[in-house]
Amino acid sequence: MVTEKENGTAPKGRLRISSYLNTVDVGEGASLLYNGFTSRIDLVPTDVARLLIDGRGWRDFSFLSPDEVLHLAGRGHLTGLPVRHEQEEFRKLAEHIFKVNEALNRRKDTKRAVAFILTYKCNLSCTYCYQNALRKTVNIPSMDEAFVDEFFRLYISKLFPRCHKKNMGFLLFGGEPLLPGNRGAIECILHYAKKHGIAVSTSTNAVLLPGMLDLIGPEEGKIQTVQVTLDGEQAFHDETRISQSGVPTFEEIIRSIRELISIKAQAIIRIHLHPDKLESTRALVDYLDREAILGNDHVYAYFAPINSFGGESVSPSYLEQFSELFQHATSIQNSPPSSFARGLARMMAPDAMKSRLKLRYCSAGAGLLRVVDPLGDIYDCYEEAGTKSRRIATLAGGEVRYFKLKDTYERRHILNMSQCLKCSIALYCGGGCMSQARLQRHSIFKPFCQQNKEFVGQTLKAYFLLNKAGKPGSVTDPVY
Ligand code: SF4
Ligand code: SF4
């Protein structure tokens, strides 16, 4: 967008705060202004940021000097456009980004992934598992070698006709993917992955991981990346992530993480945020720090609010604690504990829109991920796998047969979400989880905000503080 300052003209007439302006306090009396429309980021005194953000509508900005007004207008933080007009301009930008992203998605060298649901069975019985109901109602067999073999022979090239194999990734999912009965199918997948130079990752509860350690490691043809989940410090975790017979799992998971470190596999720790349990998350982060797990080169941890955690009405004291904890974890591992980290990693570079902006929250609808289950049904979303009415395609007779739902999901992006088009972080968020929007808000075209605004703000703050401390800040992608 060409701004007034870049155009060489001073803003004339009335001004107001851009509807897309956000701010985050970065300490020592300073705050970042970041604009979700222009992607411009500026450091200002916190009292100025407060004065700016506290009022909407046409305003008197006499608390700023003429040069400051000129600068902030040039960056898009102040605007002469009425709200509707700014929103229309934002939509035009989003339409442009949509075209760019869709063209990128069609490129042969764009990464695509197959997620194999090896089984819906699991050795654990976590209190909040989204598959609990599914396991009670359907009995789907596990994936065997014959299925995997047929999938590679007949279907993979049809699922991704425009993708070089080396640009693919495989994800092993479940249920619990590392159940002993899955070994044959996993070996088949790893064999194919080695032949074609495909990276493999898994998301596991890690309790049975030691029995599969020979299949894990940094080498080609092994599972290189392993994501495990912890719910909080031991006492809380052991209330929620338990075996079917109620046996706690914390110690076994920690043991498995140590095994991963010792063989130099990449371990990703997904730390669930539960409502009112931030103290427990804090205790877990401190424990992982003391044990030299967090901060290890082979470990990356990120926070993920569980789905029941709507987050829209969190208190200021929660936000303060959350910010402190988020930055504490960042400083230990030199990377923000956030699934938004990759998308925002380059935002701090001066004067540029260098990150790929998002029209979608995740891969659902983008055609870059296919979740395949043992019945040959294809899903666009992990959490919908196993629910037949949510399949987007099925494999049969050597062909991929698509259902209408695929087209519906393709339309799930912010251009079709009126509330998101007005949101100041829309291009960093992409509309929130589609599956949860459907379940909790009864339409996939409704937003599911969770704590996305807080995560975006804290992630930008983390990169700012890392840059300031002269630390580059590494980026690791969560498995899911
Ligand atoms: S659960 Fe939500 S975020 Fe995850 S794949 Fe499904 S739609 Fe995307
Ligand atoms: S889901 Fe919520 S936070 Fe995300 S873009 Fe939409 S309105 Fe904004």
Image: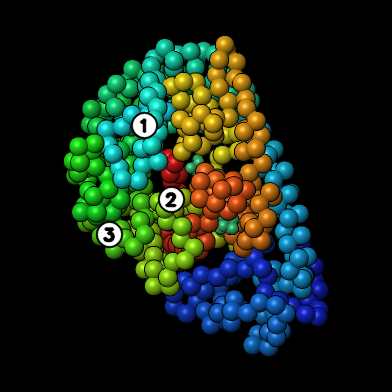
Q: Amino acid at mark 1?
A: Arg
Left or right: where 472 falls relative to 397: left
Which label belongs to residue 126? none
Which circle, 1 or 2, is nearer the viewer? 1
Tell me, yes or no, whether the two marked residues, 1 and 2, touch with CB atoms within 8 Å.
no
As helix, strand or loop, the secondary structure at mark 3 comes to helix
Q: Secondary structure at mark 2?
A: loop
The N terminus, quarter of image:
bottom right
Q: Secondary structure at mark 1?
A: helix
Category of crowding for the residue at label 2, using alpha-carbon neighbours closer than 10 angstroms: few (below 14), some (14–19), many (at least 20): some
Tell me what residue is drawn at x 67 percent, y 41 percent: 411
Q: Nearer the viewer, mark 3 or mark 1?
A: 1
Mark 3 vs mark 1, CA separation in Å: 29 Å
Q: Tell me the residue that label 2 is attached to.
A: 307
- Picture residue at 59% right of the left edge, 76% below the top: 53
In the displayed structure image, the side of residue 15 where residue 350 appears, left or right: left
In the picture shown, does residue 467 fall above or below 437?
A: below
Residue 280 - label: 3
Give the CA separation, mark 1 to mark 2: 19 Å
Q: Which is nearer the N-term, disc 3 or disc 1? A: 1
Mark 1 surroundings within 10 Å by alpha-carbon count, few (fewer than 14), some (14 through 19), many (20 or more): some
The residue under label 1 is 135
Image quadrant for the C terminus? top left
